Image (spheres, rainbow, N blue to C red):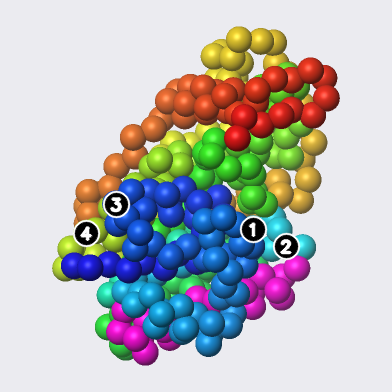
Amino acid sequence: MNNNILVTGANGQIGQILTQELSKIEGNKIFATDINISNTCSYLNILEQDSLSKIIEKHNITQIYHLAAILSARGEQNPIQTWDTNMQGLLNVLEAARLYKLDKIFFPSTIAVFGTGINQNFTANYSALHPTTVYGISKAAGENWCQYYHDKYDIDVRSLRYPGVIGWQTMPGGGTTDYAIDIFHQLIQYGKYTCFLDKDVTLPMLYMEDAINAAIQLMDTPRENIKNRASYNIAGCSFNPQQLFDKIAHYINKPVQIEYQPDFRNNIAKSWPYVIDDSLARQDWGWKANFDLDKIVLDMLENCTKIYTHFDGGEAKFAH
């Protein structure tokens, strides 16, 4: 089928890499948009329904990967704006899918939809959703809207609940789990890191390659295999900041140190699952992560080291 794909939020952490991978598969049929434009990304304010409609019509869009959103930590600084952006943006996309009879919609959800009343040691797909952040609240509501548009209008919408996503390709983007990216850059440059989470706060994490592959695999899965229209849990591996630091210290070729100064993000992280049960995704569409903690650390160290051309005691300089 001829797919013309729109990516919203394409300048975000996942959006940049997903757009690149989709372009490898689909060629020049990917139209990348964001509120922050770049050489590869056109302007779109997802809150402007008319602008979204014009893009769909002009480029004959058949699928949308809707990644535009405000994340957890940043969202707590302006809850109303976060709700408006995350909720109205999704509704605009779902309405566009209904009006233009689009082929498929991808909506990324998050483990932030979980909160109190869950088994944090092994959080099942259909656990109760009691989020503790406006980001989680918006994503939980978004899952219900996705289910509604599928049931009422037969929209083929597909969704993943991402845990923390780790990747060397982009810098931290305002999420509570972004310590797991920043720690590599800080230890490589300075040999020390101050963590905003307690050392024993365990969270599920997913490497960027696995995160991108999961989205593409889910969208490529035959429609009849998608049994869950709210969102699928997916998991990579779980660890806490001390375990991550110890693993980095084992592999890095210089002395490193860490200290802990927990801030408001610590309480957010402690409300989330420790381990995710992703058996439903494995059963329905064959999901499986490829990166464990050792593979993540080795790949991050190799690629983050290449980013910096040198460090002479001042600001690190980037190779690209």
Horizontal side of 273 relative to 249 (left or right) equals: left
Number of the front mark, 1 or 3: 3
Q: Is residue 147 visible to us here? A: no
Distance from disc 4 to disc 2, alpha carbons, whole Å, reads: 35 Å
Distance from disc 1 to disc 3, alpha carbons, whole Å, reads: 31 Å
The residue that label 4 is drawn on is 221
Provide the secondary structure element on which disc 1 rests.
Answer: helix
Provide the secondary structure element on which disc 4 rests.
Answer: loop
Chain-order first, disc 1 or disc 3: 3
What residue is at 80 percent from the left and 36 percent from the top? 261
The residue that label 1 is drawn on is 72
Number of the front mark, 4 or 1: 4
Using the image, determine if residue 244 lies above or below residue 22. above
Chain-order first, disc 4 or disc 1: 1
Horizontal side of 206 relative to 319 (left or right) equals: left
Chain-order first, disc 4 or disc 3: 3
Horizontal side of 151 relative to 206 (left or right) equals: left
The residue that label 2 is drawn on is 76
Q: Main secondary structure of the magenta part?
A: helix
Residue extent of the magenta highlight: 78-102
What residue is at 49 percent from the left and 80 percent from the top? 52
